[in-house]
Amino acid sequence: MKRGLFGVLWGGLAVALLFSAGCATLPVTRPLAELQQQQAAAQFREAMARQQDCADCLDAQVRLSLKSVVQNGTISGFVQAKAPSFLKFTGLNPLGPPLMFLATDGVFFSYVAVPEGKGYEGLVTAAAFKKYAPPGFDPGRGFYWLAGRLAPERLRIFSVAQDQEGQGLWLELAYAADVAQGETLRRQVLFDPVQQVIRRHLLTDPDGQIMVDVRYDDYVQVQGGRSDNCRLPGRIRIHASQNGALMELTLGDWLPDASFSPGDFRVELPSGFTLVPVQ
């Protein structure tokens, strides 16, 4: 499998979506009294609960830019997603025709490289696939990374603190199911209580080192008549400690009230293309 194109596109769209540059540092915070922590946690849980009523699909144009020591480039196209794990990216060449297709349902993935005349298929657990995904990224929750949300699962909140620069509240948390299964990764989420959105999402290892740092900006209202809780991020900047790169996704021209079925995320191999199973 050609490393360049697949590495860039899956690395950036595994959230449609996640790669790193520089040395991200843990946030500087101010402590809150216990009662304030309880009130802040309750406000956060309420906001996350309201998001469960938001649309579970999105469809937008996207420009994906990558800067790293070994490669730089930009590719434009379309991204479509459906909760909890369906993602599809169609990359276009500068003249308009498709250059590649990448799709996953959270269990399997398909990648079609048009210039090569080849298609690659396999499990997301395959070594060749995981090689390009940031540590800790769970394809089963891919939609929520892209939408700037958390999966609608029970959360365990360990602490709440005030951001030193006044940008919101930092919550250290984990999915309760992950904790029950012995998962040791922790999430630190910067929640804007005024705008009711997540501004930043850090994933740290057991030693407290940042593995993935995702920043969300330029939230827009896409679905008509829904609350501000259903806004989607227009810009996603992704840092991960894995490979020293910076990934940025700029999304726009959203399709209002997008609706998909699982079948929409299947990629058919064009006639004459060679299928390559991925292990």
Image: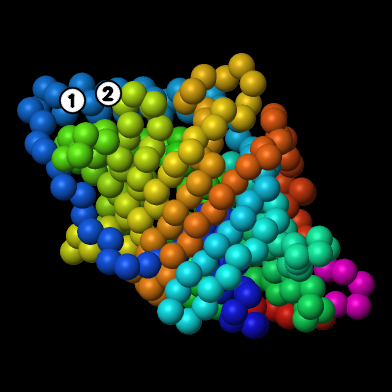
Question: What amino acid is found at the position of numbered circle 1 in the picture?
Answer: Gln
Residue at the extreme top: 225
Rendering coords of residue 81 (x, y %): 64, 46
**260 horizontally vs 7: left or right:** right
Does the rendering let one see residue 29? yes
Rendering coords of residue 137 (x, y %): 44, 59
Q: Secondary structure at mark 1?
A: helix
* Label 2: few (<14), some (14–19) or many (≥20) C-alpha neighbours in 10 Å: few
Rendering coords of residue 209 (x, y %): 23, 63
- Asked if residue 269 lies in the magenta stretch, the reply is yes
Highlighted range, magenta: 268-273
Does the rendering let one see residue 84? no
* Label 1: few (<14), some (14–19) or many (≥20) C-alpha neighbours in 10 Å: some
Residue at the extreme front: 95
- Real-space Cα separation, disc 2 to disc 1, in angstroms: 6 Å
Tag on residue 42? 2
What secondary structure predominates along the stretch shown in magenta? loop
Q: Specify the quadrant of the image occupied by residue 159.
A: top left
Query: Which coloring applies here?
Result: rainbow
Q: Are marks 2 and 1 in contact (CB under 8 Å)?
A: yes
Judging depth in this view, the residue of 188 and 178 nearest the camera is: 188
Q: Which residue is mark 1?
A: 38
Rendering coords of residue 160 (x, y %): 19, 36
Figure check: 39 above or below 158: above
Tag on residue 110? none
Q: Specify the quadrant of the image occupied by residue 163.
A: top left
